[in-house]
């Protein structure tokens, strides 16, 4: 079985992307550019004992995604505790709504957003009372 163990978010502006993900989700970054040969910052997304994976921000090697096109690649979804406050942080730090908050009945609140680099990601707040 192939389980995801790492992700990479392709970015145009590394400083802007680090600020966005650091301030919205509390990610911490370490410069791995020398190893990668391009601007590449490892992203610690939580503690060692927390469910989830770590990843990286890497310098985009081609054009940014075109607006209003189907997703090409994977959409990463972040588990969160408070949907509305997380959405407010996303929007106040330059993110945009891609698919508004909606209920996954009996499971959670889910929505999708565009980061400052044009990438789509999801947020997911477990709530068995979601309808």
Image (cartoon, grey):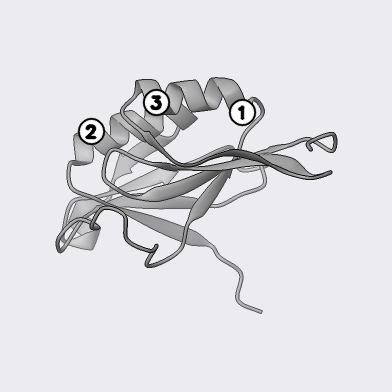
Q: Percent from the top left, x then y, of residue 94?
A: 31, 28
Distance from the alpha carbon under mark 2 to that under mark 3: 14 Å
Which mark is drawn over residue 16? Answer: 2
Question: Where is the C terminus found, in terms of image quarters?
Answer: top right
93 w.r.t. 59: above or below: above
Q: Is residue 104 left or right of residue 95?
A: right
Q: Percent from the top left, x then y, of residue 87?
A: 50, 27
**Residue with the mark numbered 1:** 83
Residue at image point 47% right, 60% down: 6
Residue at image point 52% right, 46% down: 122
Q: Are marks 1 and 2 in contact (CB under 8 Å)?
A: no
Q: Are marks 2 and 3 in contact (CB under 8 Å)?
A: no
Q: Percent from the top left, x then y, of residue 71?
A: 39, 62
First-in-chain label (1 vs 2): 2
Q: Nearer the viewer, residue 114 or 51?
A: 114
> What SS does tag 3 mark?
helix
Label 3 Cα crowd, 10 Å radius (few <14 / some 14-19 / many 20+):
some
Which mark is drawn over residue 26? Answer: none
Report if residue 26 is visible in the image: no
Q: Percent from the top left, x then y, of residue 96?
A: 37, 35
> What SS does tag 2 mark?
helix
Question: Where is the N terminus found, in terms of image quarters?
Answer: bottom right
Q: Is residue 105 left or right of residue 60?
A: right
Distance from the alpha carbon under mark 1 to that under mark 2: 23 Å
110 w.r.t. 20: above or below: below
Q: Nearer the viewer, mark 2 or mark 3?
A: 3
> What SS does tag 1 mark?
helix
Q: Residue furthest bottom?
A: 1
Which mark is drawn over residue 91? Answer: 3
């Amino acid at each position: 079985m192939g389980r995801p163990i790492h992700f990479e978010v392709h970015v145009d502006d590394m400083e802007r992307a680090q600020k966005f993900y650091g301030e919205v989700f509390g990610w911490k970054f370490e410069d791995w550019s020398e190893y990668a040969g391009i601007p590449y910052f490892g992203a610690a997304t939580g503690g060692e004992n927390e469910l989830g994976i770590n990843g990286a921000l890497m310098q985009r090697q081609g054009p940014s995604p075109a607006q209003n096109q189907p997703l090409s690649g994977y959409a990463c979804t972040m588990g969160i505790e408070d949907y509305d406050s997380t959405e407010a942080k996303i929007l106040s730090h330059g993110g945009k709504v891609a698919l508004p908050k909606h209920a996954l009945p009996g499971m959670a609140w889910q929505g999708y957003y565009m980061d400052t680099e044009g990438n789509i990601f999801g947020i997911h707040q477990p709530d068995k009372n979601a309808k």
